[in-house]
Image: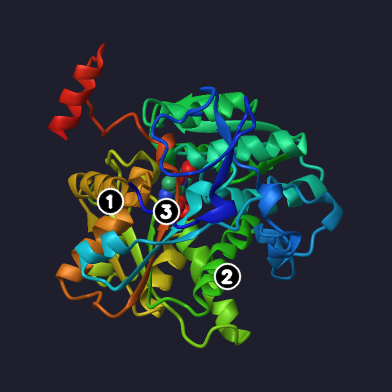
Amino acid sequence: MVQLMGSGDLMKFRCVGCSDAFEWNGMPELKCPSCGDLFEWMADKHVSTGSLLPPPQDFTMWRYAAMLPQIDEGGIVSLSEGGTPLHYAESIGEVAGVDELFIKNEGKNPTGSFKDRGMSVALTAAKAYGVKVAICASTGNTASSMAAYCARARIQSIVLVPRGKVAKAKLKQCAAYGATIAEIDGNFDRALELVKQAAGLEGVAIMNSINPFRIEGQKTGAFEVCDQLSSAPDWLVIPVGNGGNITSYWKGFNEFRRMGVISSLPKMMGVQAEGASPIVQAFDGQLETVKFVNDPETDATAIRIGRPANWKRALAAVRESGGAAISVTDREIKSARKLLSGKEGMLIELASASTIAAVLRATSKGLIRKGETVVCVATGNGLKDLDVDIEFTTSTVSTIEDISALIGTI
Ligand code: F0G
């Protein structure tokens, strides 16, 4: 018999058919011994109002509104972004040899990525300034986030994406939110060049991370990490594509440090895929400027970027913080993603899993040490990014013997 935590009235269940009450004892058949109907638990019978938690305050990132550009509060364009969990990844920490490894689960945002923080602020500003059409270049997440916030703000949206290099789920999100989708025969960098030219068009606004409101919204991720840990971590490990998010986090940490909320700054670890790693090459080569990569390639399509628009601030974040820029192979990224989903029950985007791969590398090189607190930013939900990677087989069953045999194989 399974030993249960609760007992007495708290573990009494009532049959929905005959109303008999039973003490829960595992009851594997899940049906009433008297009449065969189902059980239900009656919370209001056993729980006093005094034991309820107080109603939640604002858990969205807008609790940091004072730290954001002061745009008309009544007009905030929000889908309840931010307030994402900081997951203590004990099992991965054990594998990596780090005592305190956390994952900031940004996949829990309304459209499944960190972009929602920036988009909420950027679309709030756009609405206040009377923008008619929002436009962006994207590897998928910026596009789907912008499309959602445009729907909310009643602003038209056009997304430019590299043909064949965006995860299908992200395109379907865009379509669902009513965006106009345009494909380009070229990569993200080419799409962004084109989008920048649209800046002169009447009533049109660009929503990529060259838009400063995006950076402001995304810095709230750093505020939350500090509040969740009651300090800054030793390392903040974050994927780098266009370089906007690492810029945002570094800005957020610095603001909290200057205000005295935290007493130290983290070391920033920027992570790129090996085939799209201009920032890492500049860091390794101690270069003043970044040499762009003309044909970036990686299965982590979200960060398939060779000409990061925010390269200057991204590189500065790594250098000023005494951190590092690290590249990882697609193979390492895929195996890190599998490790995380299999050991922690958390499925994240390939781009996001690059951070776990980087921690594994950094610990083996002695760059991250056992006693340090490490936060990996899981930038996107894995459900968005299942076109490549993750193979599976199925079994066919028709009898209870088949199921027994199957249980014998696991
Ligand atoms: N992780 C994910 C899941 C992303 O979608 C991106 C960027 C990044 C990390 C990198 O962030 O660009 O601020 O350095 N995606 C952009 C897009 C390019 O269009 O969705 P960054």
Is 270 in front, or is 79? 79
Residue pictured at 42% horizontal, 77% vertical: 266
Counting other residues with Cα less than 10 Å from the Cα at mark 1, is it few (<14), some (14-19), or many (20 or more)? some
Identify the residue under disc 1.
Answer: 343
Q: Are marks 3 and 1 in contact (CB under 8 Å)?
A: no
Is 58 in front, or is 403? 403
Residue 299: x, y in percent?
Answer: 28, 38
Identify the residue under disc 2.
Answer: 223
Q: How many marks?
A: 3
Q: Is residue 290 visible?
A: no
Asked whether, in this view, residue 290 is left or right of residue 135, the answer is left
The vertical placement of 305 against 55, above or below, is above
3D distance between C-alphas at marks 3 and 1: 25 Å
- Check residue 127 in the rendering and tell me which mark sits there, or answer none: none
Asked whether, in this view, residue 172 is left or right of residue 240, the answer is right
Identify the residue under disc 3.
Answer: 4
Counting other residues with Cα less than 10 Å from the Cα at mark 3, is it few (<14), some (14-19), or many (20 or more)? few
Residue 111: x, y in percent?
Answer: 56, 40
Residue 378: x, y in percent?
Answer: 42, 54
Of labels 3 and 1, the one closer to you: 3
